[in-house]
Amino acid sequence: MMKSKPLPADPMIRQLIRQAQNAQMGRRTLLAGAGAGATALALAACSSGAAVKPTAAADTSATDKTIRWDNWALYIDVDDAGTYPTLDAFKAQTGISVKYTEAVDDNNSYYGKVKDQLALGQDIGADVACLTDWMVSRMIRFGYTQELDHANIPNLSNLLPSLQDVDFDPGRAMSVPWQGGFAGLAWNKEKYPQGVTSVEDLWAPDLKGRVGVLSEMRDTMGLIMLDQGVDISGSWGEAEFTAAIDEFKKQVSDGQIRNIKGNSYKEDLANEDTLAAIVWSGDIVQLNAENGDKWGFIVPEKGGTLWNDNFVVPIGSPGKKNVEELINYYYDPAVAAEVAAYVNYITPVVGAKEAMMAIDPTLAEDPLIFPDDATLANAYVFRGLDGTEEQTFNAQFQAILLGAA
């Protein structure tokens, strides 16, 4: 994001940047102003916006056999014709058609587009979205999701035991995992054959201006904190976060980091705008499949982040029962294996590994899809943040993103 780019979609961010440009502020002043604006943005994002939680929409699934599904890029099986085989099979099996949209680039930008409608209980144009644990936690807390009827999802019995009861959604009343994965490091093996093994390696002089990081705060800051010896799953605090944010700010201001992006970081790797980056595991497998074996991937020795994205039904969706049928379908181990064989992320479905043996035995033994104990021992979940921490840490991170825009 060091290059000139269109202004961000979020109107608050656009206004802040335009004000800074109109006032011809210097970089130091812009960063200070960005911090204030980011604080306001974080406060707005973390506020429920209303004392009374919105009411769920009436369900019209009995008469309207359609689902609108918002998801991330490269996150479902696709054939050479650009169609989705498992979705086609779902329609044939249930009669429900699905409008599938790659609408999620990162959690914050997606939430920024829909939060006002959610607060009013309005239809956001999606019946189901797949978002990361911490964002799902926020939406549940604000009353922006609908409670799932587990009687309509019998295959939920196949959910991995470790994911059946989480602190942000006890008993999985409001959310169900879609896929999980790791944030780690990738590099272009042709252009940078020496590779990288740690976050510290990203700061090498010969990578200046060719490094990318993720706009997901918990992944980028999580890897930097791990590199600094912090157990991000443990009882760290403001001092540890400040040390990591200072390092991040330095690498951005010095021009070492070129781009800070969500899912679109893949294009920067493909066009060689960046040669090394903090990335999501499954994306690199797919990029290699599409472009040749050009990129290496590693979970750093000091650790990577571990996360899950989850199905949630927005409060204004009229299609909850249809979505419950969709979730039930994808929790069939054979279907879960078919998706995992394409996306190469961690499937949450028990029995999918056995089903994968019939598709591709090598994938069944891939620890990035079916992690073994050794792989999981080097992966850390970014601990839950309270409201004040989320506001403060997000504001600091967003200030740097705004300064780099």
Image (cartoon, rainbow, N blue to C red):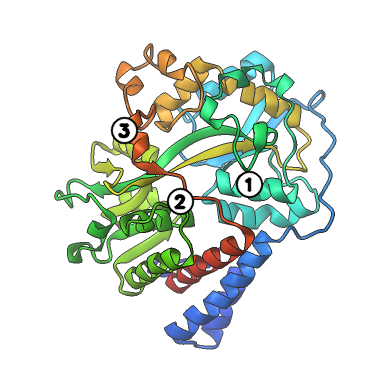
Compared with residue 249, is residue 223 higher up or lower down, i.e. above or below? Answer: above
**Which residue is at 49% across, 15% downward?**
334
Q: Where in the figure is residue 160, as x and y percent of width and height?
A: 52, 25
Nearer the observer, 257 or 144: 144
Question: Is residue 316 at all visible to an observer of this figure?
Answer: yes
Compared with residue 304, is residue 163 higher up or lower down, i.e. above or below? Answer: above
State the residue position of label 1: 137
Q: Is disc 1 placed on a helix, strand or loop?
A: helix
User: Of label 2 and label 1, which has the lower sequence position?
Assistant: 1
Q: Where in the figure is residue 284, as x and y percent of width and height?
A: 33, 40
The kind of residue on which mark 1 rests is Ser
Nearest to viewer (mark 2 / mark 1): 2
Q: Where in the figure is residue 96, as x and y percent of width and height?
A: 69, 22
State the residue position of label 3: 374
Q: Where in the figure is residue 399, as x and y percent of width and height?
A: 50, 71
The kind of residue on which mark 3 rests is Ala
Q: Is disc 3 placed on a helix, strand or loop?
A: helix
User: Of label 3 and label 2, which has the lower sequence position?
Assistant: 2
Nearer the observer, 201 or 321: 201
Q: CA distance from mark 3 to mark 1?
A: 28 Å
Compared with residue 378, is residue 223 higher up or lower down, i.e. above or below? Answer: below
Nearest to viewer (mark 3 / mark 2): 2
Nearer the observer, 358 or 267: 358
Return the mark for residue 234: 2
10 Å crowding of disc 2: few (<14), some (14-19), many (20+): few
Q: CA distance from mark 2 to mark 1?
A: 19 Å
